[in-house]
Image: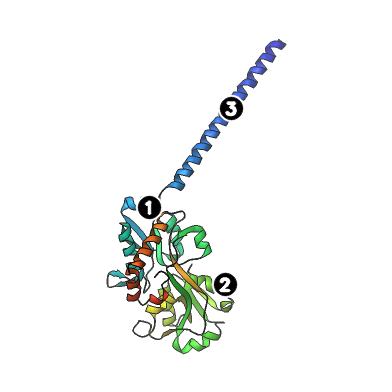
Amino acid sequence: MKLKKIIALLMAMAMCVALLAACSTQTATETAEDTQTAADTSAESDWEYIKDKGEMIVGITLFAPMNYKEGEELVGFETEFTKAVCEKLGVTPNFQEIDWGSKEIELNSKNIDCIWNGLTITDERKANMSITEPYMNNRQVMITKAENAERFAESVDGASVVAEVDSTGDALVNSDEFFANAEYTAVDSQAKALMDVEAGTSDVAVIDYVASIASIGEGTDYADLVVIEAREFPGDEYGVAFRSGSDVTEMVNEAMKELAADGTLGAIAEKYGLSDLMLIK
């Protein structure tokens, strides 16, 4: 009886070892498959995806002189710049208005293929997206009614300040001590920020200098608004953002250089009064 029990025990142990070996092999196989899937995903070409569609979906917001409407037609520096690059790449640009605060979500979910709309290059954005070389200088400026320019150059304590949500202006207001005692509200666009100041519901708007060139002063809808020149903030640079790891980024870099070399980019910049701000010439 004892011998039978020993044999049965040994057989049971052998079965357990075999089962564990099988599980180990299965786990190793699954791990290998998962690794291969991840490798295939990381190796997926963003360019092939865009080329197969025949179009590049470009995320924008509307603000002059970058992307804006004349009647029903979309015009502007970024509009013409994008079209010129896409022509070189052999795809059609499809401009899509987005909520600026959701731009990264729109990009990563493939609702858009790039963000090409006066995007300031920051370390945080570079960590989450693939961004081209900078092509234009910019800076943040405070906009107010002409009669208030001297007053708010000294202090905005107690003043109502607005900037576009998740913009460089938004980041500036939330980080610079100059705005520490202001009453700040984030709004959905730079255009809305200007409207609020014009209507008197806000005292100061913090927007891109580039936007101020075409949006305020004589001949615009905001003739009584001015840049507070006495208060300056650090400069920044614009780039085009693609999905992290995208192989389109370098293609666009090369196309931008070619357009600069043949004079196309310079002509577009001159048309919109941006020649002095260009970094690629």
- Pair 3/1: label in front: 1
Secondary structure beneath disc 1?
A: helix
> On residue 47, which mark appears?
1
Q: Outermost residue toward the front?
A: 261
**Is 67 left, or right, of 102 in this rendering?**
left
* Residue topped by disc 3: 21
Identity of the residue drawn at 47% across and 41% down: 37
Which residue is more in the foreground, 31 or 272? 272
Identity of the residue drawn at 41% across and 82% down: 198
The percent coordinates of residue 259 (x first, y second) are: 34, 65
Tell me the kind of residue under disc 3.
Ala
The percent coordinates of residue 281 (x first, y second) are: 39, 70
Q: Is residue 111 above or below residue 4?
A: below
In primary-sequence order, the first of circles 3 and 1 is 3
Q: Is residue 30 above or below residue 112?
A: above
Tell me the kind of residue under disc 2.
Ser
* Residue topped by disc 2: 175
In primary-sequence order, the first of circles 2 and 3 is 3
Tell me whether circle 2 and circle 3 mark residues in contact (CB < 8 Å): no
Assess disc 1: are there few (<14), some (14-19) or many (≥20) residues with their C-alpha within 10 Å of its C-alpha: some
The percent coordinates of residue 123 (x first, y second) are: 53, 63
Tell me the kind of residue under disc 1.
Trp
Secondary structure beneath disc 2?
A: helix
- Pair 2/1: label in front: 1
Assess disc 2: are there few (<14), some (14-19) or many (≥20) residues with their C-alpha within 10 Å of its C-alpha: few
The percent coordinates of residue 24 (x first, y second) are: 58, 31
Distance from Cα at disc 3 to Cα at disc 1: 43 Å
Quadrant housing the N terminus: top right
Distance from Cα at disc 2 to Cα at disc 1: 37 Å
Secondary structure beneath disc 3?
A: helix
